[in-house]
Amino acid sequence: MLRAKNIQIIEYPNGDKIAELLELSTQAWNAKAAEQRNALFLKLYGFDAESKEEAQWGIDKYFKG
């Protein structure tokens, strides 16, 4: 199985930040990338990426008219 490294930034309440490397499977890496692309697409067209209903409505509206 192929593995890819990812960096996770952990921010503590006092403002300190720690970066740590995570090992993710290729499938998990691709899933995270797809989520990020969807969120960026929705923000670009003014939809709320946090709301699953609005996100799906925005994607349907854009691609299905």
Image (cartoon, grey):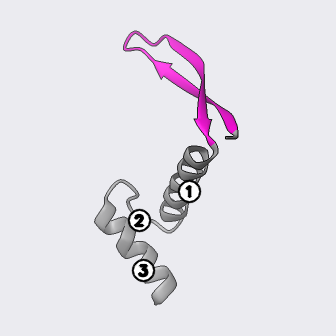
In this rendering, the answer to whether 30 lies above or below 41 is above
Q: Picture coordinates of residue 32 (x, y %)?
A: 54, 47
Label 3: which secondary element: helix
1 vs 2, front mark: 1
Tell me what residue is drawn at x 45 percent, y 74 percent.
59
Tell me what residue is drawn at x 57 percent, y 57 percent.
37
* 17 or 33, nearer to the observer: 33
Task: Mark 3 or mark 1: name the one nearer the start of the chain.
Answer: 1
The amino acid beneath tag 3 is: Asp
Task: Mark 3 or mark 2: name the one nearer the start of the chain.
Answer: 2
**Number of residue marks:** 3
The residue pinned by badge 1 equals: 34
- Horizontally, residue 2 falls left or right of residue 36, namely right
The residue pinned by badge 3 equals: 60
Give the residues in magenta: 3-25
Q: CA distance from mark 3 to mark 1?
A: 17 Å
Tell me what residue is drawn at x 55 percent, y 27 percent.
8
